[in-house]
Image (cartoon, grey):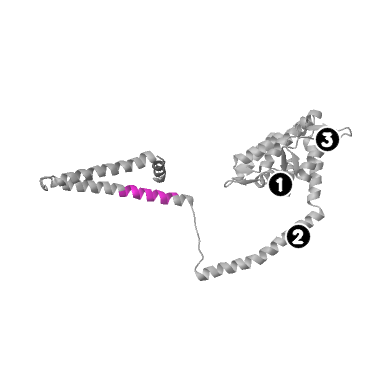
């Protein structure tokens, strides 16, 4: 446990596969780790997130676990916080309501990763490797101490981490960083506002508004207009052919020119109608008719 604490929360560099075959006990009773081919790295921010997660688990704080899970990854879209909290609540009820010596911390962390994935939160791959390593370490601990109280064992480490986080040196450093950021903000914002006012005065300020649903409606209207236009063309060809057939007796040098032209009109009308129907039923919906793939296929041939 001391080795795992040192690697994860102090060094930020941990063994990714700490199974018993990768460990030796030296003659002076020290643990030696072998085969460092699979390792993980944790930044200071990731270490802080793990501290928040462990403290939230120890204190049985559902909201804290939910917020930490959200911070540990990058959402692919909008996350329903109410549903995320409900899933974390069910997870907490399944694990933290039993006796502490029966708590499987590794299984709980795996389910936390699954909950994040279910809500389309991309968790850093280092956390997945850490979960695997934690499961291995917990298995070793329980093999030598089956009735291990994992939460009670973690509590002094969590207290040590909290003391380090809120120590005077680190708090002073964090305050200096925050003041520096505020200073940059106060310097940069007036310049940005001046630039915006200059753009407004010069008439160069542009506002772009994008809405996926609106784009779909515009595309649907455009395609519908194209189909109506094709229908008008087909109808015009049929009407024109019918008018020409009314003068079928007229010939040019004995050749019935008008019936021939009318037949061409009917053929073009049929082809146009067939193309419109194929576009609607075969290609389907409101998708655009793409000619480029067909041209590429012809070029290859």
Q: Earlier in the sequence, mark 3 or mark 2?
A: 3
Q: Residue at x 71, y 46 (%)?
A: 46
Residue mark closest to the camera, 3 vs 2: 3
Q: Are marks 3 and 2 in contact (CB under 8 Å)?
A: no
Q: Is residue 281 visible?
A: yes
Instruction: Write the residue at 51% across / 70% down.
Output: 202
Estimate the spatial distance between the alpha carbons at disc 3 and disc 2, rounded to whole Å. Answer: 40 Å
Question: Is any part of residue 96 visible from this angle?
Answer: no
In percent of width and height, residue 187 lies at 66, 66
Considering only order in the chain, which callout, 1 or 2, is on the residue closer to the N terminus?
1
Horizontal side, residue 278 vs residue 4: left or right: left
Placement of the C terminus among the 4 image quadrants: top left
SS for dot 2: helix
- Residue 97 is situated, as x and y percent measured from the top left of the image, at 72, 35
Residue under numbered circle 1: 46
Q: Classify 10 Å Cα crowding around label 2: few (below 14), some (14-19), many (20 and above).
A: few
Nearest the camera: 89 or 126? Answer: 126
Residue beneath the point at 78% across and 55% down: 171
Q: Nearer the viewer, residue 18 or 180?
A: 18
Q: Position of residue 68 (x, y in %)?
A: 68, 45
Kindly identify which residue carries mark 2: 176
Q: Residues within 10 Å of mark 3 (few under 14, many from 20)?
A: few
Task: Kindly state the secondary structure of the residue where label 3 is placed.
Answer: strand
Q: Exactly how many numbered labels are in the figure?
A: 3
Q: Residue 237 vs residue 147: left or right? A: left
Q: Specify the quadrant that holds the N terminus.
A: top right
- Determine the CA span between mark 2 and mark 1: 21 Å
Q: CA distance from mark 1 to mark 3?
A: 26 Å
Residue range (magenta): 216-229
Q: What residue would you read off at disc 3?
A: 31
Task: Name the disc covering residue 219, or none.
Answer: none
């Amino acid at each position: 446990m001391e080795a795992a604490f040192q690697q994860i929360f102090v060094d930020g560099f941990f063994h990714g596969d700490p199974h018993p075959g990768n460990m030796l006990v030296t003659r002076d009773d020290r643990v030696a780790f072998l085969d460092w081919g699979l390792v993980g790295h944790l930044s200071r921010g990731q270490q802080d997130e793990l501290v928040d997660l462990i403290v939230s688990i120890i204190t049985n704080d559902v909201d804290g676990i939910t917020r930490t899970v959200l911070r540990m990854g990058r959402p692919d879209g909008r996350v329903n916080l109410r549903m995320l909290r409900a899933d974390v609540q069910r997870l907490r009820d399944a694990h933290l309501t039993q006796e502490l010596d029966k708590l499987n911390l590794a299984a709980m962390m795996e389910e936390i990763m699954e909950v994040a994935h279910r809500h389309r939160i991309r968790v850093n791959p280092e956390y997945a490797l850490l979960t695997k390593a934690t499961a291995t370490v917990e298995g070793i601990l329980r093999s030598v101490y089956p009735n291990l109280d994992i939460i009670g064992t973690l509590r002094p480490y969590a207290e040590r981490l909290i003391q380090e986080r809120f120590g005077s040196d680190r708090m002073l450093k964090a305050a200096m960083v925050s003041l520096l950021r505020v200073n940059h903000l106060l310097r940069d914002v007036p310049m940005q506002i001046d630039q915006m006012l200059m753009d407004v005065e010069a008439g160069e300020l542009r506002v772009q508004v994008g809405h996926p649903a609106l784009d779909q409606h515009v595309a649907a209207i455009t395609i519908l207009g194209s189909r109506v236009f094709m229908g008008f063309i087909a109808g015009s060809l049929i009407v024109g052919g019918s008018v020409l057939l009314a003068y079928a007796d007229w010939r040019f040098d004995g050749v019935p020119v008008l019936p021939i032209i009318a037949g061409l009109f009917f053929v073009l009308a049929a082809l146009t109608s067939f193309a419109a129907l194929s576009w609607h039923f075969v290609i389907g919906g409101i998708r655009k008719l793409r000619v480029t793939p067909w041209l590429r296929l012809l070029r290859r041939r």
